[in-house]
């Protein structure tokens, strides 16, 4: 407790040099971890099974199940205990693509690059139809299309007539300047109160109108029995980013089939149609829904603690295993999953007997709203809405997450937990040669450490080089094994393993921030 | 003649400043051309018809015929005379893709990005088969596959297990330093004698062996009735470069169907198969051959000369209209074709009555060996093998070509014709603000001006910014209208029109290099 106070004071006063002296690092152990992680890595083999072999891992899909089953078996094979699928609650329908073919046939033949939007139905066999440009800003605009769209391929207008060319490299890493700036941040940027909005503002009125229009349009197109809707996928050069076109909920309304089409192919069709050229397309899309098990599951496995007093305390590491469906989710997030599995393997392989229990969790349904980790946190640690906590909350030492692509670790986000700063600074010191140096008090969002943070648990995401995450891979049809950087993944696994080792060996648990204040209950609930 | 001699002396002595003074440029005419070319351009509309509307324009294909017919009609509609298709000789079979579908079905479903290799047959309906890795360095290695490949999908091993990530921007333009270096070149790099090679060297022996092996392999796979061969296409991120898998010759031997597969998809299948995972694929490829007309054609059209003494002299401009089949050949070379058509349109629209006749030619079968322009040169100007020239050779003033993508003009290659340097320098002067300044005595190759150069005619290709020609578009499935840069094409058309104007108005023809020496006749011919 004393030490914890000291760290807090140091963080506040900024005297970190002497704090470093307080935090001892077992260099021999780090060396063992480095040797195994850098020179005997299995991280690429693991990633291969999670991507190429398992395939796309959309939440609830057979692909995710294949990856989960393989992970459970593999972790057990490496000597982890309690390796299992743990249900976290109800998710919804599984879904996968079973046939994906579409082509322009008039004015000439051209097979297009496209991906069915997740949770949309197929075309119910091969179809062929003219492409119709639907221009409808209001519901009454739809009247002129009534009775004319059955079996047709629908396209919508865009401002864009052609795609931009690539003036920047796909790949980027943090510069020293960028890292220095992150390190110099003095407090976590407040999430702050949500922007006050006036429900009667023109913006909100426009939004409501657009939402109503979209709902009306969806129903109209379904009722009109359109053959297929084309949507423009973000991306260029054959790279297409994917989304969902309907809800995974078992109660979700049926929609018309919708195909996310590469920018080049979408705009080609649009330009032709707008120029008055007749365009005919053929398509054969088959998707399947799975409703036999609506439950969501996480993979969990442990290396049990061995210290009589500390073994009930738990260190968790994780990342989400689910992906989008356009590729094999290599950087989002087979990368993080493989690194976390590899960190477990490293610690087991070097024969480490941890004081505290080490537990890995590979989450599911992260892409739909961090559901896997939120469900896990709710059943083990507490409810972020009421801040009613469970006994396990007091025993969870720290949670480390990896979900920002294939880039190596450059440091760690403290998520405002400034007292942890000097500790992590000391733990990163042996990895300066591998480019990991930066501790920032800043927050980062969008992934599963937030579920822990929400109930007052120390949950951290590492800082990772961006690589081509935003330009090429994040939710795209090109998020494949090719985009994995072997050296980066080895580095990350080595550092994670070392962080886990240090957390487990440390006299005290990682200092915590003050408990968050639960949000006010919504009226009438 | 005097003036010509003066230029030659100036080029040799490097005194170009005073030479500039000798070459007058009609600034008012240039201004008219700029106004029409930059502010009333139709180049993008032309490019749209040549790409999106016509489709892929492989030599001999219906797509090329559509583009040729449209160009003939459009040039006539703009007021050109003698707008027609002119046959240049025998080409071979036409070919086009009429269905292109392939997918992995085991271990999970995944539609692949792929293009049938040009002039290969289809699968004769839908097929489904296991993927077999064929490893055969010698013909005897094939024995073990005998009787085992019928209906199978064949893949070959590569050194590569994954693709590299993009560390450079796709797009690039010439830097001032690069242009300065080009301008400073003092003589055309000699094509020089071909590298002497020893037919008994290990390299040549290896090449002969590989060629024999390839021939044996082709026949073996055909005899074994393989379902489909997968070949790895160059490129990443969904971009795939295409080639031909068989000859266009009407006498060419039949081969097995072959599919150029995106790097990501090829390597995914290869990694799975090499790891002992069963992979099954389905495919449905239909290609059609056209043998009703084996002739090749160029588009030609003219603005007739009006000066009694000079109208028999001809200035030609051109670029090839044919493309590869994976996309719509936007930068290779709808761009050059559209610019050259636009240059004609500009000159006609401003009401220019040229002294000399101006003729556009849009070549075909450039991609197979500059056949369209070579055939045209042979029938109009002379035979480069014997250097026996025709009367028209003396009347061809200059030929200007454009075929290096969508990048704007930065200058011109003299192709060793140093006497033309000061003239072009003067003509470029009004376009300094548009980035076109550089005259280099250097050669550039690989396109149709070489056919003219080969019979002693002044044939020039402009220097163009590289843009994403080598990274994304040149022969790829992504060479689409999107990759066209509107401002660059407008600039190019304006400069070409101005060059043509100046050539036509000039007192003398463009000075020529000495006639090339015909190559020694091959023994026994």
Image (cartoon, coloured by chain):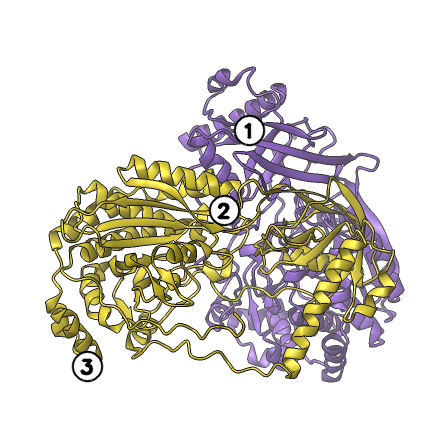
Chain colours: A purple, B yellow
**Camera-nearest residue between A124 and A476:** A124
Judge whether residue A307 can be spotted in this image.
Answer: yes
**Camera-nearest residue between B283 and A369:** B283
Q: Mark 1 = which residue? A: A154
Chain ID, mark 1: A
Chain ID, mark 3: B
**Camera-nearest residue between B376 and B206:** B376
Vertical placement of B191 versus B150: above or below? below
Is label 1 or label 2 in front? Answer: 2
Q: Mark 3 = which residue? A: B13
**Residue A247 is drawn in which quadrant?**
top right
Q: Is residue A341 left or right of residue B377?
A: right
Q: How many marks?
A: 3
Q: Position of residue B165 (x, y in %)?
A: 58, 64
Residue positioned 25% across, 57% down in the render: B395
Q: Is residue B166 left or right of residue B139?
A: left
Q: Position of residue B366 (x, y in %)?
A: 46, 55
Label 2 or label 3, whichever comes before in sequence order: 3
Q: Which mark is residue B295?
A: 2
**Residue A230 is drawn in which quadrant?**
top right
Secondary-structure class at tag 1? strand
Judge whether residue A297 can be spotted in this image.
Answer: no
Q: Residue furthest front?
A: B524
Chain ID, mark 2: B
* Neighbours of disc 1 within 10 Å: few (<14), some (14-19), many (20+): many
Quadrant location of the N terminus of chain A? bottom right
């Amino acid at each position: 407790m004393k030490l914890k106070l000291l760290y807090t004071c140091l963080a506040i006063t900024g005297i970190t040099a002497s704090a470093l002296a307080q935090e001892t690092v077992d260099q021999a152990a780090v060396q063992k971890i480095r040797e195994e992680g850098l020179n005997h890595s299995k991280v690429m083999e693991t990633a291969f099974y999670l991507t190429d072999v398992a395939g796309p891992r959309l939440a609830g899909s057979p692909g995710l199940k294949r990856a989960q089953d393989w992970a459970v078996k593999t972790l057990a094979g490496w000597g982890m205990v309690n390796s299992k699928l743990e249900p976290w609650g109800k998710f919804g329908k599984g879904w996968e693509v079973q046939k994906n073919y579409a082509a322009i046939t008039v004015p000439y033949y051209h097979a297009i690059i496209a991906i069915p939007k997740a949770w949309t139905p197929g075309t119910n066999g091969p179809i062929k139809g003219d492409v119709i440009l639907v221009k409808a800003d209001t519901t009454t605009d739809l009247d002129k299309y009534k009775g004319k769209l059955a079996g047709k391929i629908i396209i919508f207008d865009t401002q864009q007539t052609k795609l931009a060319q690539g003036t920047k490299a796909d790949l980027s890493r943090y510069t020293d300047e960028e890292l220095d700036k992150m390190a110099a941040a003095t407090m976590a940027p407040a999430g702050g109160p949500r922007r006050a909005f006036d429900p009667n503002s023109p913006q909100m009125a426009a939004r409501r109108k657009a939402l109503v229009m979209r709902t009306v349009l969806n129903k109209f197109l379904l009722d009109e029995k359109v053959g297929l809707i084309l949507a423009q996928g973000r991306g260029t050069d054959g790279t297409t980013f994917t989304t969902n076109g309907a809800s995974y909920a078992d109660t979700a309304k049926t929609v018309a089939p919708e195909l996310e089409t590469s920018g080049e192919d979408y705009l080609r069709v649009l330009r032709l149609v707008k120029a008055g050229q007749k365009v005919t397309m053929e398509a054969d899309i088959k998707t399947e829904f799975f409703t036999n098990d609506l439950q969501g599951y996480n993979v969990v496995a442990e290396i049990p603690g061995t210290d009589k007093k500390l073994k009930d305390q738990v260190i968790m590491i994780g990342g989400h295993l689910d992906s989008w469906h356009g590729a094999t989710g290599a950087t989002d997030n087979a990368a993080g999953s493989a690194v976390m599995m590899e960190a477990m393997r490293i610690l087991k392989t070097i024969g480490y007997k941890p004081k505290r229990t080490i537990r890995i969790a590979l989450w599911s349904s992260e892409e739909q709203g961090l559901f896997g980790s939120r469900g896990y946190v709710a059943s083990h640690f507490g409810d972020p809405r009421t801040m009613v906590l469970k006994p396990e909350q007091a025993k969870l030492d720290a949670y480390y997450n990896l979900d920002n692509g294939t880039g190596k670790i450059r440091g760690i986000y403290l998520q405002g937990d400034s007292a942890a700063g000097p500790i992590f600074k000391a733990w990163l010191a042996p990895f300066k040669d591998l480019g990991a140096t930066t501790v920032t008090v800043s927050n980062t969002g969008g992934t599963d450490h937030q579920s822990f943070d929400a109930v007052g648990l120390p949950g951290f995401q590492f800082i990772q080089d961006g690589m081509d995450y935003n330009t090429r891979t994040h939710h795209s049809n090109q998020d494949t094994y090719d985009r994995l950087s072997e050296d980066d993944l080895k580095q990350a696994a080595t550092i994670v393993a070392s962080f886990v080792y240090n957390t487990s060996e440390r006299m005290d648990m990682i200092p915590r921030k003050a408990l968050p204040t639960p949000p006010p209950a919504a009226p009438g609930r």
